[in-house]
Amino acid sequence: MGVAKTKDLQLRLERTEQQLMLFQKISRFMVREMSLQDVLQGIVSLIVEFMNCDSCLVYLADNDELVLCASNNPHPDTIGRVRLRMDEGLTGWVARERRLLAISREAYQDPRFKVFSDLPEDAYEAFLSAPVIARDRVVGVINVQHRWPHQHTGSEMEVLTTVGEQVGCLLLLAQMAPAAVETANHVEFVLSSASKS
């Protein structure tokens, strides 16, 4: 096997190990007793580190709107205040279409783009976005942005899609009262749900 091929395989293995570590760390957030805000902030930080991006924003659904709930950039006055309808902007398009969106340069030129004067990320070049899915419903959107043009890899797209699914499960778990987890008869629940299918 050639040196170049060996080096390529080694790099791919390292990246796969990094992906696994990312998913493990997010899984550990899911089983801890932490506030949902802290968990979302932790996930945002992990994504920024893994993807080496300049921005990660998490929007969650509130009826027919998406609300900014977590960001790696320090603009706390926008959390909970930046809202957009499901038919607004790139983020709304991702939620409405239930599809991943990757734009490698000049995302702000896309006709679906909506400007928010409060968000400096609006001037960033590259945009990658995935829906947050829970029980086959879109409950939010995760956006990753780079200041400069960036060609998103298949691996980055798959990672963001998977993180969107993990965050969706996390949101469902967060709605369960701790007492419900302790007192639940898990065997009975599983067996009764199997008989309904």
Image (cartoon, helix red, strand yellow):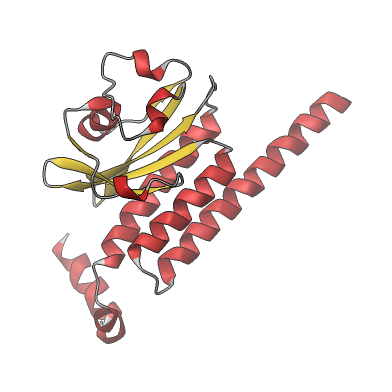
Farthest left residue in view = 63
64 horizontally vs 167: left or right: left
Residue that appears at 65% across and 48% down: 17
Quadrant assignment, res 56: top left
Residue 22 versus residue 189 in the image, above or below: above
Q: Can residue 1 be seen from the camera position used here?
A: no
Return the x and y of residue 61 as percentages of the image width and height: 20, 46
Query: Quadrant of residue 50 in the image?
Result: top right
Looking at the picture, does residue 45 appear above or below residue 34?
Answer: above
Quadrant where the image shows the C terminus: bottom left
- Pinpoint residue 128: horizontal percent, then vertical percent: 42, 30
Residue 192 % position (x, y): 18, 73
- Nearer-the-camera pick, 197 or 23: 23
Q: Is residue 104 left or right of residue 133?
A: right
Residue at position x 28%, y 25% from top?
Answer: 115
Q: Position of residue 173 (x, y in %)?
A: 30, 66
Q: Residue at x 24, y 35 (%)?
A: 95
* Viewer-side residue, 73 vs 109: 73
Query: Looking at the figure, which quarter contains the N terminus?
Result: top right
Number of callouts in the render?
0
Q: Where 132 falls versus 38 (above or below)? A: above
Q: In the visual, does 80 lie left or right of 120?
A: left
Is any atom of residue 53 visible in this view?
yes
